[in-house]
Amino acid sequence: MTDPAPPPAGAALRMELGPAQAAARAEFAAWVDAHVAPHAGAWDRAAATPREVIDRLAATGWLGAVVPREHGGAGMDWVTFGVLNEELGRGCSSLRSLLTVHSMAAHAVLRWGSRAQKERWLGPFARGEAIGAFALSEPEVGSDASAVQTTATPDGDGYVLDGRKKWTTYGQIADVFLLFAKAEGKPVAFLVERGAPGLEVAPLGGITGTRASMLAELRLEGCRVPKEARVAGPGFGLAVAVATLEVGRYSVACGTAGLIRACLDASLDYAARRVQYGSAIGEHQLVQRMLAEMAAGWRAAHWLCMRAGWLRDAGDPAAAHETFVAKYAAATAATRAALDAVQIHGANGCSEAYPVERYLRDSRVMEIIEGSTQIQQVAIARAELESRAAHL
Amino acid sequence: MTEEEIRSRLRAFVERFMRGHDLQDAEDLFGTGYVNSMFAMQLVQFVESTFGVACESDDLEIDNFRSIDALTAFVQRKLGAPVA
């Protein structure tokens, strides 16, 4: 599936998918149209992703997207992974978020894990036999990851974890959590297995969007883990979190571009069909304005995501900043697109009979996770200021 | 690569973050207030790509990355060079 020569750092970027990437997109799109989009509303209403859906996704091998082939994964390049997120996000933001957190856990093990951790987890992650999740947020800790209150107390040849994690996506079903704590004041990352004594997983319900994403709260009380569960050394927890969040941010950005596409597709179909004042509402100029905004928003988000993917594939350090820009642009455009999609659908847009009210609720989530819009704005502005200052 | 070459490359990278601060070789980079949460990750990537070494799980102790002195010694160890 990997196209032969990703552009070297600094080379002019290709602005179209390679043939293998385009073929992958067609395969992802057909699968989403057949197995995801028609059912996403029902999963949302049930506030759960059925196990057979996850098993079917696992059978595609795409849960091993970021795992290299030598570890049994799909070994996708970042552009192809982005396209997968975009297509899944077009069908269902909840299921896309499973790919996000699972890929984050897999990437963290790959990038920062010990040899034993790689041997233990990468194969099962790639096959979808084990689901990984990301446990950073806490009741009192969101954007400021350095402030986690969960503690890891050294105890013999291991640690004892105490604290609470909140909003853990797919925490209800995850088999292992990439979990962040502080040991003697230093940030440390751990792989904590479901079933660890002292770990209680409580479902979190009643959320606005990505309702099928099976959120959980993790309660750690005297939860003992061996030293071998630590990912990288003491003090490196924040670096692990930041690098892992970059993967998550890219996945969310691409998934959000897909969400905009879903708003656009639904709105185009409805505007072509719905007749008022003797003509399809797509002929009404004020509706056209909303469609045009949505179409431009989708293209901007899509190409920013693809650019971030190409830069990641090229190993270009600018990828991190471009991913911030892509996620910010996609999330804010998704909010506008979803609001307009509901508006175009009128009263139908406020009904569960149409998917756009779900898109609106899901779009709200995208401006909050993996860096809120305000955090992104500050990060982008600072980086631009520094970049300008460096040129003066 | 000599110790001085390693040190000077590390210093050139780290100084980009220091906004003119007069960094000492033994100074705690994370205590300067000039680096953010991205820095440790960027530093690992820089060390790997510049010196062609793999920072594996056991290497990822923050004390290996804490100062120019510590980084220089770490890179020398990874390159198998005798520590001066």
Image: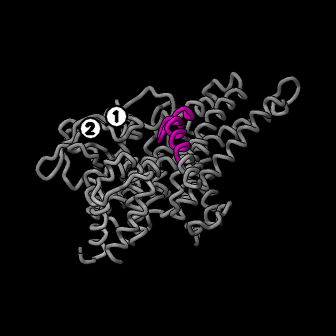
Residue closest to the eye, A142 or B16: B16
Q: Is residue B74 above or below residue A331?
A: below
Q: Main structural element of the magenta stretch: helix, strand or loop? A: helix
Position of residue A172 measured from the top left corner of the image (x, y, whole percent): 36, 38
Along the polypeptide, which appears first: circle 2 or circle 1? 1
Q: Residue at x 87, y 29 (%)?
A: A279
| Mark 2 and mark 1: Cα distance apart in space | 8 Å
Q: On the picture, is B51 further left or further right than A282?
A: left
Q: How many marks?
A: 2
Position of residue A252 measured from the top left corner of the image (x, y, whole percent): 52, 45
Quarter holding the N terminus of chain A is bottom right
Q: Is residue A5 visible?
A: yes
Q: Is residue B72 above or below residue A387?
A: below
The residue range painted magenta reads A362-383
Q: Chain of mark 2?
A: A
Position of residue A133 measured from the top left corner of the image (x, y, whole percent): 38, 46
Residue closest to the eye, A359 or A234: A234
Position of residue A294 measured from the top left corner of the image (x, y, whole percent): 71, 38
Label 1 crowd (10 A; few <14 / some 14-19 / many >=20):
many
Q: Are marks 2 and 1 on the same chain?
A: yes
Q: Is residue A69 above or below residue A222?
A: below
Residue closest to the eye, A173 or A118: A118
Q: Quadrant of residue B5?
A: bottom left
The residue tagged 2 is: A150
Q: Quadrant of residue B52?
A: bottom left
The residue tagged 1 is: A138
Label 2 crowd (10 A; few <14 / some 14-19 / many >=20):
many
Q: Is residue A366 magenta?
A: yes
Q: Is residue A392 magenta?
A: no
